[in-house]
Image (cartoon, rainbow, N blue to C red):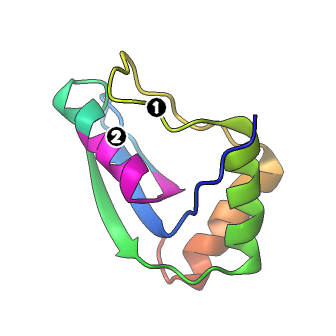
Amino acid sequence: MKNHEVLDLIQEITRNDGTTYMEIGNMLMNGRAELAAERGFIRQVRILQLNIPHSTHVIKYQEYVNENFEIPDESMDHWEEWQKTPEMQEEVNLILKENHIG
């Protein structure tokens, strides 16, 4: 199944154990993360940067996300952290670097 989400923001997600991770997402995903925080599945989410440039790194990661994951609907009963291959983690690291985050 292929989705067509456009990723255009960087968010920091705080897990319930207090550790954090960066995710490239969009407003819909951010809204779902806010809902997950309200339901206690994660501690919090915050947007670090909006409207990031649609670089080749963003395009590669966006294709990976659209091929492998779905944004949950409002009936979600847990938070699914998008697991990244080492190659995709490097793409995220490059996105953070090109946006001066990290």
Mark 1 residue element: loop
User: Is 7 placed left or right of 92 in the picture?
Assistant: left
The N terminus, quarter of image: top right
| Residue closest to the far top | 77
Mark 2 residue element: helix
- The residue wearing badge 2 is 32
**Residue 51 percent location from the top left of the image:** 44, 79
Number of numbered discs: 2
Q: Is residue 65 above or below residue 95?
A: above
Q: Is residue 49 above or below residue 88?
A: below
Say what amino acid the circle numbered 2 marks. Arg
- The residue wearing badge 1 is 72
Q: Quadrant of the rendered structure where residue 26 is?
A: bottom left
CB-based contact (under 8 Å), mark 1 and mark 2: yes
Q: Main secondary structure of the magenta part?
A: helix
Q: Which residues are magenta?
A: 22-34
Q: Residue at x 58, y 36 (%)?
A: 70
Q: Does 32 appear in magenta?
A: yes
Q: Residue at x 32, y 63 (%)?
A: 47
Q: Earlier in the sequence, mark 1 or mark 2?
A: 2
Say what amino acid the circle numbered 1 marks. Pro
Q: Residue at x 50, y 79 (%)?
A: 52
| Residue closest to the far left | 38
Badge 1 crowding class, 10 Å Cα cut-off, few under 14, some 14 to 19, many 20 or more, is some
- For the residue pair 54 and 14, the one nearer the viewer reads as 54
Q: Residue at x 56, y 72 (%)?
A: 96
Q: Quadrant of the rendered structure where residue 12 is?
A: bottom left
**Residue 67 percent location from the top left of the image:** 76, 42
